[in-house]
Image (cartoon, helix red, strand yellow):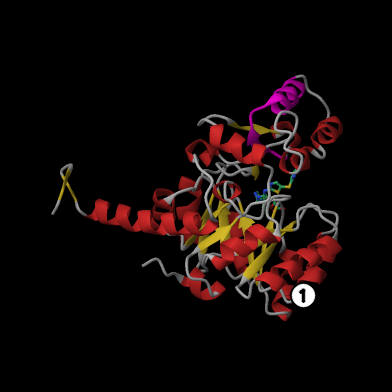
Amino acid sequence: MFTTRVCKLLNIKYPIIQGGMAWVATHELAVAVSEAGGLGIIAAGASPPEVVREEIRNFKRKSNKPFGVNIMLMSPYAEDIVGIICEERVPVVTTGAGNPGKYINKFKEYNIKVIPVVPTVSLAKRLERIGVDAIIAEGTEAGGHIGEMTTMALIPQIVDAVDIPVIAAGGIGDGRGFLAALSLGAEGVQMGTRFVCSIECMAHINYKERIIKSKDRDAVVIGRSTGRPIRTLKNEFTREYLELERKGTSFEELERLGAGRLKLAVKDGDIATGSVMAGQIAGLIDDIKTCKEIIEDIISSAELQLKYITSMKGGELDG
Ligand code: TUI
């Protein structure tokens, strides 16, 4: 029912892509999402190239399904990771936190599909011109490093501005969000926070439980003063960080304060002084289930929701 150009482009059953979350998106999560009919993504984050190579090889040992690697473009290793992705013949690349323009020709040489995450219409148009295969349009509801536009406003504007398929991200966690994204003209969704709360995700249980406990306004933004805003769940760390920002603390000092905090939360389970990056949809998520259940529940509830909408008649159901 929801077969789109994204399914054909990526050779997947459902147009659902897993977000490339540093430390969280290991090959175990990617295998589970790809095996369930979506596109699993291994996040390179700030990992050294050889660690990323090993993750790619681990994926290939466990699954023959399509998958991707996310390159965080602020990583000091971004260039070397591009090389490894090409050597390892990874089928799909997503990028974040920057403009991947200078790598596009190399990926095309190796027949690798490139799908950048963008926060604006102008960047989407520029990247379409230089030959990317699709765009992930991410709204400010997302977790981690974010732009300014909301998903609701950004998606239809990018859909109207480009001809390549658009994948919606930011604030999507269930069948209603999936259907809403398709209604705005997207041909797929990318979800991060929802997949953190999966059985197969290797993040510490404290991280998953913190998402489950969170309420609507818990996903706050730190780092606005540095020009690198990050959405992360309210805790001791965000309170200290925001207080220092209010006092006008320098960029360098704030960067030092933030260093290593994501790993602390994801790996050690320190959800008080670590950074529990998550999107605004965290308040909706109340369970941990398999990636297969997450994906199948989204598709079946979106089908049901679509039937419900098309049968609405003055507040009563038709038939
Ligand atoms: O990249 C993300 N989310 C991230 S990356 C990340 S790693 C990190 N860890 C600790 C501190 C800082 C970063 C955590 N979360 N999402 C995709 C995304 N990309 N959101 C926004 C953008 C983006 C922003 C600017 C993409 C392109 C862009 O281009 C600017 C330019 O150069 O034109």
Occupied quadrant, residue 87:
bottom right
Q: Is mark 1 within 8 Å of ligand 1?
A: no
Q: Residue at 48% of width from left, 70% of height from top?
A: 13
Callout count: 1
Image: magenta residue range: 228-246
> Of the residues shown, which amino acid type is indicated by label 1?
Glu
Return the residue nearer the eye: 293 or 244. 293
- Does residue 88 sit above or below 195 in this rendering? below
Q: List x then y, in percent, for residue 137.
A: 56, 55
Q: List x then y, in percent, for residue 119.
A: 60, 50
Occupied quadrant, residue 222:
top right
Specify whether 90 is left or right of 280: right
Helix or strand or loop: what does disc 1 sit on? loop
Q: Residue at 72% of width from left, 37% of height from top?
A: 269
**Quadrant housing the C terminus:** bottom left
Occupied quadrant, residue 70:
bottom right
Is residue 175 inside the magenta stretch?
Answer: no
Question: Residue at label 1?
Answer: 88
- Can residue 184 be seen by looking at this rendering? no
- Can residue 84 be seen by looking at this rendering? yes
Return the residue nearer the eye: 319 or 128. 319
Specify whether 66 is left or right of 73: left
Q: Residue at 15% of width from left, 43% of height from top?
A: 314
**Quadrant housing the N terminus:** bottom left
Return the residue nearer the eye: 139 or 258. 258
- Does residue 234 sit above or below 292 in this rendering? above
Q: List x then y, in percent, for residue 25.
A: 68, 54
- Does residue 1 sit above or below 24 in this rendering? below
Residue at the limit of the structure toward the left, as seen here: 319
* Crowding near the residue tagged with mark 1, few <14, some 14–19, many ≥20 C-alpha atoms within 10 Å: few
Q: List x then y, in percent, for residue 283.
A: 51, 35
